[in-house]
Amino acid sequence: MPRTVSSSPFVPLRRSALTAAAALGAFALTTLPAAATATPAQIATSKTNGVAYLKTLQAADGSYAGSGLSNEWAFSAFAAAGTAVVDVTPGGDASKNARTVYRNLLSTSGWPSASPVVTDYERGTLNAYAAGIDPARVSASRNTFADIYGYWQTAEPGYFGPSANFNGTVFAALALNGAKTQSGQVRVPQALRDAMVTRIRANQHNDDGWNFSKAEGNPSQLAAASDIDMTGAAMAALCVSGVPNTDTDIAQAKAFLKSKLVASSGAFNAMFGVNTDSNGWAVSGLNACGINPQTGDFLTSMGRTPVDFLISQQFNPGGGFKYLPSDTSPSAYASIDGLRAVAGGGFTAAPPVPATAGAAQWVAQGSFTPGTATKLALTVDDGAGGLKVCSVGFTPTGTTTTLGAVLDAAVTAATPSGCVTSITPATGTGTVTAVNGKANSGSNTWKASTDGSAFTAATRDRTVNAGDTIALRWGA
């Protein structure tokens, strides 16, 4: 059984057969020829029918997310298939479109739960982005980038959330690197990307794949069998972090996946057997790395590919995908994972231009709301390997703020603490000359960047806008 994608996704849970078989009706199955790769026409039909099925998962109030198992991962599949989430409405009621309803949910103080984990915010980031909601600017109070930053592990830099739950770090890399700015810029600095990449590499097993739990420094775990689905996710995390698909670790992971191919079907033989979800995650990993899952290493001796297998799991014309080959009805999660992979998607995708007249491709909180508490994401790089990452809580007094005000707040209101312990000057509007006791020295000075922009001289009066992802760096 595959890893469940629940209200707290990526936690190492396994779905029961009953849950896997949960469905919204059964349809007649149309199978592919016995030995043929999926054609562009077949893929186009799969996408059209898959989108139609995912639209049936929308509740009458327009929602996809709710208590228990949640279907908001449909947004990443919609985007990959070319459907704007704002165009998905119950019965044509545009006031209840899926994007608006999801944004309202993320904006509530009770979301995601009373005891959230980092993967909640990673899920929210990836799906908000696919829905056309700027995840760092969901609302006056919600910034999911800052929420993720708050789970940085100071004692184990590069991990987000407890390191034993390695998938929290994999999906941090997917979210922080994959959810780009509206103009397509990676928001986080290279030092943070490198730290996550280092940890992901260190967790690659001896068989060249990955699993959901931490393996770094543990010979028995490194020797354990890897998962198909987490190998796909980890590959994608490396590639969206800037690692080329010619990299040795990617090439080895590719070989691991190839070794699991079933020649007769094109499926990957996953840890819990052949199933749509695991195969979908593996194909999404290949997609994210720009590796064609229908050619070369992934075209079997019997002329089958992983995409063939996924389409063979789809009921047509209904469009839902079954979880196991033996199932007789579709599963919501299998349908999401299957469609996203067949459509060529990784684990998120930029939102398509909406078809709804007047609907914007993106929605975002444009400015701070004075008096409304919020958070900003901050990294401080001392140039000597001492990277600090934190979420800074503060209450703005205007529609914009300043870098000085954010750094001042970080001294007392950062999670984790210790991100900023001191700043010089402590008042005024001038150039920042020292942070955490490290002073400017010749050409090595403190510089600042927001949302991945070029680093320029850090000054206390530098304007900071709602949702800006802030990076400080000491160096030339």
Image (spheres, helix red, strand yellow):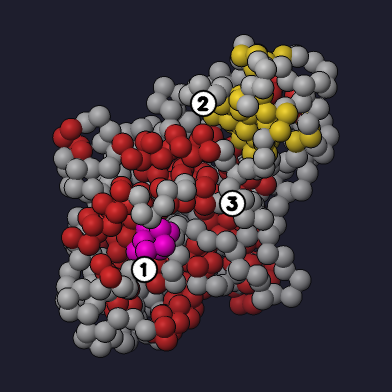
Mark 3, residue position: 180
Q: Secondary structure at mark 3?
A: loop
Part of the protein shown in magenta: 283-291
Mark earlier in primary sequence (3, 1): 3
Relative depth, front residue between 332 and 273: 273
The residue at 62%/33% (across/down) is 471
Instruction: Determine which residue is flagged by label 2.
Output: 387
Q: State the residue in front, 476 or 54.
A: 476
Q: Which mark is residue 292?
A: 1
Q: Secondary structure at mark 1?
A: loop
Q: CA distance from mark 1 to mark 2?
A: 36 Å
Q: How far apart, in angstroms, are the residues tagged by discs 3 and 2?
A: 21 Å
Relative depth, front residue between 241 and 410: 241
Which-is-in-front pick, marks 3 and 1?
Answer: 1
From the top left corner, tell me how far across and down residue 96 is, in percent: 65, 66
Q: Position of residue 387 (x, y in %)?
A: 51, 26
Occupied quadrant, residue 132: bottom right
Viewer-proximal residue among 416 and 209: 209
3D distance between C-alphas at marks 3 and 1: 23 Å
Residue 453: name its quadrant: top right
